[in-house]
Image: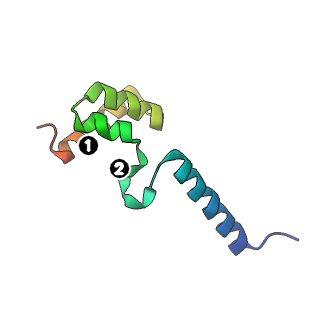
Amino acid sequence: MEEPVEDRIARLEQQVAALQRYLGVDLSAGDGSRFSPEFHEALRQGKTLRAIAIYRKETGASLRDAKTAVENMQRRAGHVS
């Protein structure tokens, strides 16, 4: 007999929550929280190259896409004019 869908969803939600705790991520807080504290610190300190490197590592993005994303985040945060 197959596991009821509701039970399967509840189990999967528990697994996702455990992974979030393990990785130190809180997806409920908004888009930026999916990145590590090191990434946010690099952004705050204006270390663009470091932020791009971390972004690439955490997302698998290309250099061009990471650079664009980081620069957009800096602009929105008011770190770059």
Q: Label 1: few (<14), some or many (≥20) within 10 Å?
A: some
User: Height in image: 15 above or below 6?
Assistant: above
Mark number, residue 41: none
Q: Residue at x 39, y 34 (%)?
A: 55
Q: Position of residue 46 (x, y in %)?
A: 21, 32
Q: Position of residue 22 (x, y in %)?
A: 56, 48
Visible residue check, residue 47: yes
Placement of the N terminus among the 4 image quadrants: bottom right
**What residue did someone put label 1 on?**
73
76 relative to 15 in the view: left or right: left
**Quarter holding residue 67:** top left
2 relative to 14 in the view: left or right: right
Label 2 sits on a secondary structure element that is: helix
Verify CB contact (< 8 Å) between mark 2 and mark 1: yes
Placement of the C terminus among the 4 image quadrants: top left
Q: Residue at x 15, y 37 (%)?
A: 80
**Quarter holding residue 13:** bottom right
Mark number, residue 32: 2
